[in-house]
């Protein structure tokens, strides 16, 4: 349904209103596009032009050398002859593709577990539990959204360190000097993936969508002898592509840009760092670059323009994911409760 009905659009007052709305929306688009444009142009500028004042909207000498350095020469083999020790942080001890693989593994694992766990929880609350228990469990699961993420960092860290006990060390078995069996998932992929496998907002979306699926379809399948897993696979999944696309995109975006949790968990396994940690290390190292001591690094074209270039590279998969799921995402906007 259009914002303004087609009837009467030829009136001058309506035309002025439409023109004002269009100008306002295009102004918002331009404002949101400026940071992207600034990051891209800064990434193709020479290092000295990034700091030039007044800044230029387009580089006078555009170059993609920093992208080649990031993608193909970003290893410990690239030395800084005579450079300062602090600036060595600007160069990672692993190739770029290792960080990219780590981000892909972490993001893929979080998406797989998040979709499976949250979809089954939402289906159980919507179609399996009694109304009384469904309301209680729904408030319990969605209530996790009200707990700030920073408040759960320490309990999650202790739980990952000594699973399944959220303590500094595993307790002793009663009347013995033997500790309970436990698993230390620090410095592993699992330590990042498993705590992010559940999301209260995803459960909210799944349950809201599943509530709109007629119970008659499910009851008919039960009369035909189908199991609940079979019903979920043959009936629920084909009808729920829009909500799966929405949850998949949100899960991908959140997992791909994770920074604080991997930084805490991977303290002794820096070879498992994702791209977000690489971007942090690069920015931290380049902020301490000395133009005199680190001339070789700067002359190679590797300066703060590399931070912008890596930011552009890291944002490309998010854009590709949106393009892949755009059709289902548009349908997912019409989820139950938003119609």
Image: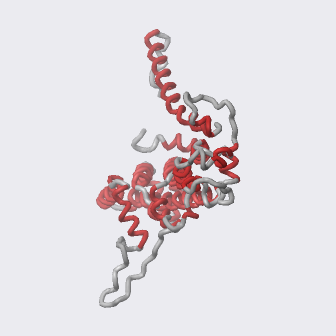
The picture places residue 143, in percent across and down from the top left corner, at: 32, 55
Q: Is residue 313 above or below residue 266?
A: above
Asked whether residue 165 appears in the rendered view, the answer is: yes
* In the image, farthest residue toward the bottom: 176
Does residue 312 show up?
A: no
Which residue appears farthest toward the top when viewing the image? Answer: 12
Counting from the top left corner in percent of width and height, residue 264 is at 45, 62
Q: Residue at x 50, y 57 (%)?
A: 115
The one of 295 and 131 positioned closer to us in this rendering:
295
Image check: 247 left or right of 327? left
The answer to which quarter of the image holds residue 177 is bottom left
Which residue is painted at 32% across and 52% down in the image? Answer: 146
Q: Nearer the viewer, residue 203 or 6?
A: 203
Q: x%, y% of residue 93? A: 61, 61
For the C terminus, which image quadrant?
top left
**Colour mapping:** secondary structure
* Front residue (pair 131, 17): 17
Q: Is residue 225 above or below residue 9?
A: below
Picture layout, residue 298 above or below residue 261: above
Relative side of 133 to 201, left or right: left
Q: Tell me where residue 74 sits by quadrant.
A: bottom right
Residue at 34% in and 53% down: 148
The percent coordinates of residue 187 (x first, y second) are: 51, 68
Numbered circles on residues, count: 0
Q: Residue at x 33, y 90 (%)?
A: 176
């Amino acid at each position: 349904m259009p914002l303004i009905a087609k009837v009467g659009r030829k009136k001058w007052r309506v035309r002025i209103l439409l023109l004002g709305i269009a100008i306002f929306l295009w102004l918002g688009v331009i404002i949101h596009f400026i940071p992207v444009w600034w990051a891209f142009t800064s990434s193709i500028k020479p290092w000295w032009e990034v700091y030039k004042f007044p800044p230029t909207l387009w580089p006078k000498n555009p170059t993609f050398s920093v992208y080649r350095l990031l993608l193909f020469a970003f290893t410990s083999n690239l030395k800084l002859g005579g450079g300062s020790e602090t600036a060595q942080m600007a160069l990672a001890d692993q190739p770029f593709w290792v960080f990219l693989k780590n981000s892909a593994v972490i993001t893929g694992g979080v998406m797989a577990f998040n979709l499976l766990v949250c979809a089954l929880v939402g289906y159980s609350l919507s179609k399996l539990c009694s109304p009384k228990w469904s309301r209680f469990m729904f408030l319990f699961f969605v209530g996790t959204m009200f707990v700030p993420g920073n408040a759960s960092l320490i309990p999650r860290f202790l739980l990952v360190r000594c699973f399944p006990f959220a303590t500094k060390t595993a307790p002793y078995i009663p009347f013995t000097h033997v500790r309970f069996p436990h698993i230390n998932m620090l410095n592993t992929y699992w330590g990042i993936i498993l705590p992010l496998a559940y999301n209260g907002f995803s459960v909210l979306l799944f349950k809201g969508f599943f509530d709109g699926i007629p119970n008659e379809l499910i009851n008919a399948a039960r009369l035909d002898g189908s199991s609940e897993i079979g019903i979920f696979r043959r009936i629920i999944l084909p009808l729920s592509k829009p909500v799966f696309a929405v949850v998949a995109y949100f899960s991908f975006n959140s997992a791909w840009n994770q920074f604080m949790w991997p930084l805490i968990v991977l303290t002794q396994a820096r070879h498992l760092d994702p791209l977000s940690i690489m971007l942090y290390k690069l920015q931290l190292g380049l902020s301490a670059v000395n133009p005199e001591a680190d001339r070789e690094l700067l002359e190679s074209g590797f300066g703060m323009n590399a931070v912008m270039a890596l930011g552009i590279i890291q944002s490309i998969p998010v854009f590709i994911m949106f393009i892949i799921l755009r059709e289902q995402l548009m349908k997912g906007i019409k989820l139950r409760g938003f119609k």
